[in-house]
Amino acid sequence: MASKLHLTSILALTLTYCTTNFPLATSVGVNWGSNASHPLPPAKVVELLKSNNINKVKLFDANPQVLEAISGTKIVVSVGIPNSMLRSFNASLKAAENWVHDNLTRFTSSVHIEYISVGDEAFLRSHGEQFHPYLVGAASNILKAVTKANLVESVKVVVPCSWDSFQSESDLPSRIQFRPDVNKTMLELLLFLSRHRSPFFVTISPFLSYHENKNTSLDFALFKETARPRNDSHSTYKNSYDLSHDTVVSALSKAGFPLMDIVIGQIGWPTNGAANATSSNAETFMKGLMKHIQSKSGTPLRPKHLPTEVYIMSLLDEDQRSIAAGDFERHWGIFTFDGQAKYNLDFVEGATKLVNAQNVEYLPSRWCVANNNRDLTNASARALEACSAADCTALSPGSSCFNLSWPANISYAFNSYYQQHDQKPESCGFGGLGLITTVDPSVENCRFFVELQTSSSSSLDRSFLMKWILSPMIVLFFVLDGR
Ligand SMILES: *[C@@H]1O[C@H](CO)[C@@H](O)[C@H](O)[C@H]1NC(C)=O
Ligand SMILES: *[C@@H]1O[C@H](CO)[C@@H](O)[C@H](O)[C@H]1NC(C)=O
Ligand SMILES: *[C@@H]1O[C@H](CO)[C@@H](O)[C@H](O)[C@H]1NC(C)=O
Ligand SMILES: *[C@@H]1O[C@H](CO)[C@@H](O)[C@H](O)[C@H]1NC(C)=O
Ligand SMILES: *[C@@H]1O[C@H](CO)[C@@H](O)[C@H](O)[C@H]1NC(C)=O
Ligand SMILES: *[C@@H]1O[C@H](CO)[C@@H](O)[C@H](O)[C@H]1NC(C)=O
Ligand SMILES: *[C@@H]1O[C@H](CO)[C@@H](O)[C@H](O)[C@H]1NC(C)=O
Ligand SMILES: *[C@@H]1O[C@H](CO)[C@@H](O)[C@H](O)[C@H]1NC(C)=O
Ligand SMILES: *[C@@H]1O[C@H](CO)[C@@H](O)[C@H](O)[C@H]1NC(C)=O
Ligand SMILES: *[C@@H]1O[C@H](CO)[C@@H](O)[C@H](O)[C@H]1NC(C)=O
């Protein structure tokens, strides 16, 4: 009897929950990552967000300079805890409390923080068992710390899951399951989330589905009306987004959480670093996605229960993202690294096009190229060395600079290295093969970058200057001392 009553009340609760809490619209935000050698200054990024009416951002850390720049705006923020911290937060409540105290509490009066995302895709297959065993322990310690800091009413603790957390022989929703090696942890996570009414954060990637699975057509991935639909049991899917979304729904249902809210934590289309990673495909994809979101039409398995939020991957290109998954990883931005729109997009209903970052400060208009007056026989080895430190993803097959002939491709590599090293003269050495020029070597789509001025590059300049000022004084000192 008691258990029956209990069951009815759970059912009643669930029903109220699902009739009152389904989001009627999906809000759109962006991922703002910081794995760049010369990041656009936070204040400029905040201006960029404001001028494009973007009022939700997802961060991968809790960088105080970034939160400072967001302070006092209407931008709603999701802060992140890097994977490297999971182990210590699982082991120690005190460490979690320190993090919340040091990085969160002092900003909660001036920044609207909505989520703390614990880990960055800790379930990624390539991470193996390095991070995910600590996830749930870390998340619950963070939640305890948030509760102790009296923030639990306003801040939810969530855990972003990678697209490869799922697995099946086909990509159809009815066949899908959580990956066997993570499903135990996943179940604990889902219990944790549902207990605290937190949504399930997940990456959806029509680009990767297309890139990896030759069964998906480009048209299907790009929301084209002409794409051949795919059927799964009684549902017909017209695009890859719906299919992927329902894959998540299906996996959650099978695990016993059919009503859990979904947030798409990352979705986008890269513009370089792989075949079909082009601005024109990205534009088609993003426009299709925006239209889908604005139409408020659900998916076959969830016609009315929309995702609460969708976070675009990504705001800006980042030249230091790991390229383990592919060279395209550094080219997810809807804006280039320096805040210039790659294509047009109605980000919010009624907007006409994206607004670029203003008054961006670059290093001087100087490039490093291969010196044609030298014997360049061994230049390729030098270029490879440069590329191992710098960003040569634009030279890979299918990318914007793939068609450069030799030695222009060597120049590209030299220049990337030179820019990443703040145009320091010695970073254009390459055993005498490098040459600094003021003539822009860019050709067509292949842009030879000039990096941004950053506080570290200007402070470097200052320290150089100090050395020049100080060294005669030191010499003088020794001369005087020696007498
Ligand atoms: C996480 O922390 C708990 C409590 O300290 C500990 O028992 C558990 O072994 C830790 N998990 C891992 C994977 O080390
Ligand atoms: C956050 O807090 C931790 C622990 O107090 C500290 O080590 C870290 O540097 C802080 N800052 C960021 C951006 O996480
Ligand atoms: C690809 O499609 C064919 C026929 O439509 C199907 O038999 C096969 O299982 C699919 N493969 C994958 C990996 O989805
Ligand atoms: C985990 O995966 C195994 C193997 O596929 C399966 O037998 C088991 O039912 C799964 N458990 C959960 C909780 O999904
Ligand atoms: C998918 O289902 C629809 C209607 O249920 C049917 O008309 C169509 O032929 C099916 N398509 C395929 C490729 O099986
Ligand atoms: C990308 O597009 C080209 C045509 O432009 C096509 O031939 C190629 O197979 C596609 N690449 C991938 C990875 O599917
Ligand atoms: C970003 O950089 C941090 C450290 O600089 C690294 O731990 C993390 O894996 C990087 N993320 C990506 C996606 O490359
Ligand atoms: C190129 O490298 C080889 C082997 O290291 C060396 O013997 C040769 O002198 C180099 N050529 C030039 C032009 O530097
Ligand atoms: C590169 O060259 C090939 C053939 O010369 C051409 O088909 C292709 O469109 C070019 N790619 C770019 C990105 O310019
Ligand atoms: C430059 O092009 C040459 C010839 O096409 C090729 O052998 C070399 O590997 C390329 N170097 C780089 C850094 O892309």
Image (spheres, rainbow, N blue to C red):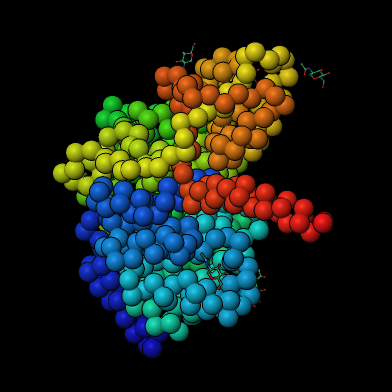
Q: Residue at x 50, y 45 (%)?
A: 38
- Give above or below for 115 relative to 423: below
Q: Quick one: 330 or 161, which is closer to the camera? A: 330
Query: Where is the C terminus found, in terms of image quarters?
Result: bottom right
Where 169 sits versus 214, above or below? below
Locate residue 196: give its quadrant.
bottom left
Residue 236 position in % (x across, y down): 31, 39
Residue at (26%, 30%) from the top-left corner? 225
**Residue appearing at x 61%, y 34% in the figure:** 425
Residue placed farthest to the front in the image? 483
Foreground: 199 or 334?
A: 334
Residue at the farthest right position: 482
Q: Position of residue 183 (x, y in %)?
A: 56, 60
- Single out the residue that lies furthest toward the bottom: 2
Q: Is residue 462 left or right of residue 335?
A: right
Q: Position of residue 286 (x, y in %)?
A: 32, 38
User: Where, by quadrant of the figure, is residue 23 drawn?
Assistant: bottom left
Image: 380 above or below 307 = above
What residue is shown at x 48% (from left), y 57% (from top)?
60
* Residue 299 showing in the rendered view: yes
- Quadrant in which the N terminus appears: bottom left
The answer to whether 396 appears left or right of 110 in the picture is right
